[in-house]
Image (tube, rainbow, N blue to C red):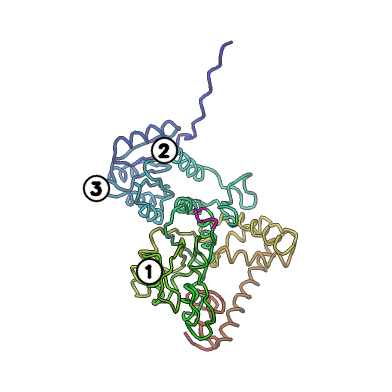
Amino acid sequence: MRKEPAKAAPARGNGARLLVVEDRESLRRMLERALGGEGYRVDVAADEAAAVAALGAGRYDLVLTDLMLPGGSGMAVVAACRALAPPVPVVVMTAYGTVATAVEAMKLGAADFLEKPVELDDLFAIVASLLGERSAEPPPATEPSEGEPHAFVAGPGCPPIVGSHRRLHSALRLLRRVAPTETTVLLLGESGTGKELFARALHALSPRKNGPFVAINCAAIPESLLENELFGHERGAFTGAHRREPGRFERARGGTLLLDEIGELPLQVQGKILRVLEERTYERVGSGEPQRADVRLVAATNRDLQAMVEAGELRSDLYFRLSVFPLELPPLRERPSDVMPLARHLLARLAERHGLAPSELTPAAGELLAAQPWPGNVRQLANVLERAAILRPGGRLGASDVEEALSGAEQGDRRQLEEALERFDGDKRRAAEELGISYRTLLRRVRQYDLEGFPRYRR
């Protein structure tokens, strides 16, 4: 019986045009052959000048560039691609040990990165994903495609991180790379972008996943109590210390400790955190005996730490220790396509938590939500949806319902802020502590609601 020849697997490239920028000829040719075999049209360049000239002469769908180039830098290639209209996505290649540089490239606009030696399966997956996002029409906000990857679940005990935007998935890719290590991670992003969710995902994907996950908001604890809260105290260390109490470092032993709002650490505590990072030891209040800090440290902030260093508010040596692996979370306003899947996810959780029938959003309500600036990000979206779901449980939430919830949430936020300021006679720092937010966040809200001087002017 005659055997039929096997059918060739369809190429996935669909003729997309790629530019590969790599100075090492052997690797350049290998990438050209491999990507060409997948159906892509591939041009090559050996240095920055040739790459920039190629970008000026033709239109590319994606660029793959090394970071270390003779007579230039892959960073310049990233910048040139971002300057095009529309910008071209860039994947950077980096040698082992220069991942921090790749992170900087992603902050400048690179879509993703690959470590050398390049694994072709990883390369093909990244290229196909990025080109698929560029070429495919985005699904309607109210009717997402069947099976669309909206949620990333890190592991047991970790809530899902919802969204399909490229910047969010790039951040998740970085998270998966760094999670198995002991590297200190610095989560950067505005309030409400999900920094604690990312910290929990880091923990769930790490070898310490069976240990405790402990979080502390450095802005919510008075300066006089923060050292005790972090490191614990011995019996008799101060009036009322009737027994030894463990601090957060001790409670997190064998696991992960999240220092949220690390930009609010007072200077006298910063040196003690630096000692933990450098020597892996600390001392309880009232004791001179060093304790071993067996924790993986994750820090989070919505502040510009480099500007704080320049202003003398943050020790430069602590900043360099914290920023070994920065990971930036995009604000919700920069990924409006994620608002609808996020809203569905949040409404389902709200219904389960409050024992309500799940609410649905009409297309008009979805469009209205996606058009909001969301200064409070996902946290603000959750608050608005909770109000709407309670006012109209189990029904279809229309644009008018969303408008009512948006207005009510803003009024409630303003009222809560007014009450805190009135309770503390205008003392903004004490009001911030009471509300569990940072001093800078409170100042932003005071400006937003035009409450400067209410009920009387105090810092």
Depth order, front residue of 35/288:
288
Which residue lies at the image location 51% right of the left edge and 25% below the top edge? 8
Q: Is residue 441 magenta?
A: no
Q: Earlier in the sequence, mark 2 or mark 1?
A: 2
Residue 296 pos. (x, y %): 46, 60
Query: Which contiguous range is marked in magenta?
Result: 205-210
Report the amino acid beneath label 2: Arg
Outermost residue to the top:
1
Secondary structure, mark 2, is: strand
Mark 1 residue crowding within 10 angstroms, few (<14) / some (14–19) / many (20+) = few
Q: Nearer the viewer, mark 3 or mark 2?
A: 3
Q: Nearer the viewer, mark 2 or mark 1?
A: 1
Circle nearer the N terminus (3, 2)? 2
- Magenta-drawn stretch, dominant element (helix, strand or loop): loop
SS assignment at label 1:
helix
**Closer to the camera, 37 or 122?**
122
Q: Which residue is located at x 50 percent, y 58 percent?
A: 334
- The label number, if any, that marks residue 71 in the structure image: 3
Quadrant in which the N terminus appears = top right
On the question of residue 169 being in view, the answer is yes
